[in-house]
Amino acid sequence: MVVDMESDFDAGRGPEPSARDSLAAIAVDRRRLGRLASAPPWYYPAVGLGTAVVVASPAFGSPVAMAIACALAATGLAVLPSLFARRTGLSISRPAGAGGVVFLVALALIVLLLLMASVVLVVLDSRPWVALTAAAGFLVQYPGGLLYDRIYRAELSRA
């Protein structure tokens, strides 16, 4: 049986794109995806607020109040990605590259240190100072999230 390869080609489509054209189209798609993957303006302030609540939670008086505050903040933080996915149609489950991983680990360590500082302040009976650690948690996540967005877009574009 002789197979005519030309018969498998849809003559109505026109010529097949060159490899260069295909790579250019992929680059355009990556840039478009990078723009689409940017978080909406409310996203990182909401992340910062949830982080501030968690960091401030040791000052809430009792372990039960702390647990409730952390549970509410964690629920809010867990819902944010689904709201983002609903808005964009994208579900981002992991960083696009090593730079994003390193940056997210650094953010998490800073927040953990702020939480530990809050616990120490409560133990030292300096609860009013916990407001500073909570504010720092907000300020780490809000601009930090915006910077992570830039890193993510850049890594997505280079992938």
Image (spheres, rainbow, N blue to C red):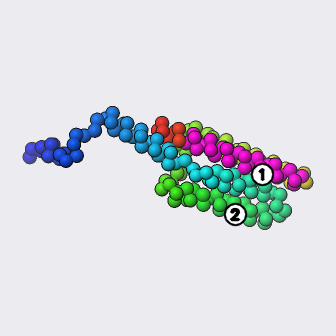
Provide the secondary structure element on which disc 1 rests.
helix
Looking at the rendered structure, the kind of residue marked 2 is Leu
Determine the main secondary structure of the stretch shown in magenta: helix
Is residue 127 found left or right of 48 in the rendered image?
right
Relative image position of residue 61 (x, y in whole percent): 84, 62
User: Is mark 2 in CB contact (under 8 Å) with mark 1?
Assistant: no
Provide the secondary structure element on which disc 2 rests.
helix
Looking at the rendered structure, the kind of residue marked 1 is Ala
Is residue 21 found left or right of 46 in the rendered image?
left
Relative image position of residue 130 (x, y in whole percent): 83, 52
Is residue 140 found left or right of 27 in the rendered image?
right
Q: Is residue 91 magenta?
A: no
Is residue 52 found left or right of 97 in the rendered image?
right
Crowd rating for badge 1 (residues with CA inside 10 Å; few <14, some 14–19, many 20+)? many
Q: Name the residue furthest top.
A: 20
Task: Tell me where the magenta segment starts and ends, as one range.
Answer: 126-152
Residue at (8%, 46%) from the top-left corner? 1
Residue that label 1 marks: 134
Decide if residue 154 is in sight here. Answer: yes
Residue that label 2 marks: 72
Residue at (12%, 43%) from the top-left corner? 4
